């Protein structure tokens, strides 16, 4: 086993890896951006090193800074988590070249399966049927138009090096092609470091079923059951469960065999997930994620395995200690993703801010994986996943009822979250009877009357009190020496933090929030901090209610800022590339 593992990630997955390492007696190293200086994963780790910068490109996607932290820390292994460099073959090779173990598959397997285009080719070569689509990247809108004419609309434009719904746009007609391509490329570049995109036919009512696989370097490849991840919005998962409900056993076994076959065909080692779309009794290969999945806890609860532990053991060269016949699935598990999103009326608008209170639900069969504690700031620069609530029950209905109970106990204040949407989903007869699909949330579930949970109402803005006459108190503070993080005790002035907005670091969030889509008075404002990626109007343009004025990127998602008033654009106050904050006016409409 390793002596010291560096986690090249942040948030809940970094905390998750740290916890297993601690149980195994392995020391941990965290890395952090300027904004994550006092983040939960940093406080949890044995050591921490600064990467510098605020954006992902400056920090968690900065390979020289990461490799420097690996060298300086003396880590003998790197766990990439998910996202960022988790499916980057070049980074895996750089880690290996430095004499350090990459906790993941061989770079060659990442190249084949981590790239969604080459994974389609590999799956087809191994006899596994894929969703109809192209096996070459596209750059010209004419290619997209030709694809749509051939297979029919809608179609999906997807990030070639992505996953988790990032960089995916569904195009319903030819008029949407150019903007959808541009948006998909921007999101793909921001989250995965590559703008490459490809095309697939968009199925109208499929279920998303994926197989968890685990392979060692001694020729053993197993599938650890399946997960149903069909409750999605914006092509990103909201609810995941295992086993998949109402899935015929012969289909389940065939999917498992196909997943193992695809993994063996590319020489796969370590944990991975092979994803399928299931519709009308048929399943098609979608993609393979060459990493640990966000939803891995549901597999852990029904198998009794710690997947992070087995990632580390396999990376250290150990063989799997069990066979396919040894695996027995017990009960049913459900996971919901607690995202910093305001789900009022089904909008799912990003909602960064400060977590002012967090009460964790308890009781039998309840687990919360979180990257935040009360007082921590949820930044608009990073992914909006705050926590994952996971429950186990002896059957699906018991798990569903337990999840509803646990959601009722959860208190997460200071930011709006997806909790109200989860309550609506878990309470709906369609979900209870497993009649949902990947399009169900957005096409069939009525969230128009959904309000914000009072427990999750953002706190009112306030001021941070300070005074030079305050007595000094002994505080534990963070210091950096040559880029390494240390905790030291100092006598400092007692700065009273009277605002509920003030976080652990004493930094207040920006101006009061207002509606993402404008106030109705003609002043079009934004809800959150972010970056303008495109301006869609100029002074003199006539706009209608609901028309997009500009596109704001926040929390790795593009969000249309729309007009609440019809009229003439009098003034545009932003340009592409501008950084803006909550309450900023982007345009004025007469």
Image: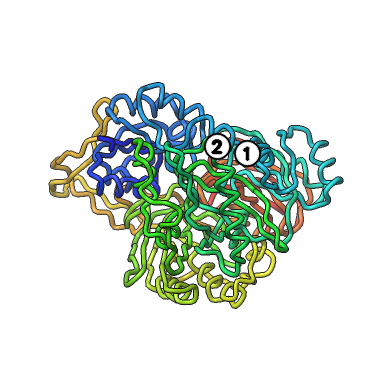
For the C terminus, give its image quadrant: bottom right
Quarter of the image for residue 532 reads top right
Q: Which residue is mark 2?
A: 192
Q: Which residue is nearer to you in this view: 220 or 65? A: 220
Left or right: 133 with respect to 460?
A: right
Quarter of the image for residue 442 reads bottom right
SS class, disc 2: helix
Which circle's residue, 2 or 1, is located before the other in the chain? Answer: 1
Viewer-side label of 2, 1 = 1
Taking the image as drawn, is residue 578 in sight?
Answer: no
Q: Which residue is nearer to you in this view: 260 or 131? A: 260
SS class, disc 1: helix
- Give residue 358's position: percent from left, percent from top: 34, 62
Q: Residue at x 56, y 53 (%)?
A: 256
Q: Which mark is residue 119?
A: 1
For the N terminus, give its image quadrant: top left
Distance from label 2 to label 1 (Cα)?
A: 17 Å
Left or right: 414 with respect to 530?
A: left
- Give residue 546's position: percent from left, percent from top: 71, 58
């Amino acid at each position: 086993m390793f002596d010291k593992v560096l986690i090249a990630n942040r948030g809940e997955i970094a905390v998750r890896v740290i916890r297993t390492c601690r149980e195994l007696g392995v020391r941990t190293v965290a890395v952090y951006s300027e904004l994550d200086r006092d983040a939960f994963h940093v406080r949890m780790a044995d050591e921490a090193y600064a990467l510098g910068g605020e954006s992902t490109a400056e920090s968690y996607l900065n390979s020289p800074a990461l490799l420097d932290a690996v060298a300086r820390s003396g880590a003998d292994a790197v766990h990439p988590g998910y996202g960022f460099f988790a499916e980057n073959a070049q980074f895996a090779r750089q880690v290996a070249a430095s004499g350090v173990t990459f906790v993941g598959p061989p770079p060659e397997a990442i190249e084949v399966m981590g790239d969604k285009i080459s994974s389609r080719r590999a799956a087809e070569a191994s006899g596994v049927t894929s969703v109809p689509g192209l096996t070459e990247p596209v750059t010209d809108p004419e290619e997209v138009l030709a694809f749509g004419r051939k297979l029919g609309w809608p179609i999906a434009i997807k990030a070639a090096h992505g996953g988790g719904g990032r960089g995916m746009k569904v195009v319903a007609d030819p008029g949407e092609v150019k903007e959808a391509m541009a948006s998909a490329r921007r999101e793909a570049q921001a989250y995965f470091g590559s703008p490459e995109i490809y095309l697939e036919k968009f199925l109208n009512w499929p279920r998303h079923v994926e197989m968890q696989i685990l392979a060692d370097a001694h020729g053993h490849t197993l599938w650890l059951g399946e997960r149903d991840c069909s409750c999605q919005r914006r092509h990103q998962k909201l609810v995941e469960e295992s086993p998949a409900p109402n899935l015929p056993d012969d289909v389940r076994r065939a999917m498992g065999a196909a997943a193992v076959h695809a993994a063996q065909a590319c020489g796969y080692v370590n944990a991975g997930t092979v994803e399928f779309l299931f519709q009308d009794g048929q399943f098609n290969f979608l993609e393979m994620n060459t990493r640990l999945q966000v939803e891995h806890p549901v597999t852990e609860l029904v198998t009794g395995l710690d997947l992070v532990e087995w990632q580390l053991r396999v990376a250290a060269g150990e063989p799997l200690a069990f066979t396919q016949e040894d695996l027995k699935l017990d009960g049913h598990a459900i996971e919901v993703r607690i995202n910093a999103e305001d789900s009022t009326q089904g909008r799912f608008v990003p909602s960064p801010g400060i977590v002012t209170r967090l009460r964790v639900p308890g009781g039998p069969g309840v687990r919360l994986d979180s990257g935040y504690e009360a007082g921590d700031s949820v930044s608009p620069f990073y992914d909006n996943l705050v926590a994952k609530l996971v429950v186990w029950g002896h059957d699906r209905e018991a798990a569903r009822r337990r999840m509803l109970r646990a959601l009722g106990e959860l208190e997460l204040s200071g930011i709006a979250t997806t909790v109200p949407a989860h309550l609506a989903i878990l309470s709906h007869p369609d979900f209870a009877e497993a009649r949902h699909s990947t399009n169900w949330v957005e096409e069939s579930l009525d969230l128009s009357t959904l309000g914000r949970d009072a427990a999750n109402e953002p706190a009112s803005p306030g001021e941070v009190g300070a005074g030079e006459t305050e007595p000094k108190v002994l505080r534990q503070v963070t210091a950096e020496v040559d880029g390494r993080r240390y905790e030291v005790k100092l006598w400092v002035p007692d700065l009273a933090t009277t605002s509920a907005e003030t976080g652990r670091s004493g930094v207040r969030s920006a101006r009061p929030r207002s509606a993402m889509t404008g106030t109705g008075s003609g002043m079009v404002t934004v809800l959150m901090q972010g970056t303008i990626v495109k301006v869609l109007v100029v002074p003199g343009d006539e706009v209608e209610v609901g028309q997009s004025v500009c596109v704001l990127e926040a929390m790795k998602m593009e969000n249309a800022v729309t007009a609440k008033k019809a009229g003439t654009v009098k003034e545009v106050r932003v340009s592409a590339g501008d950084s803006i904050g909550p309450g900023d006016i982007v345009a004025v409409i007469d």
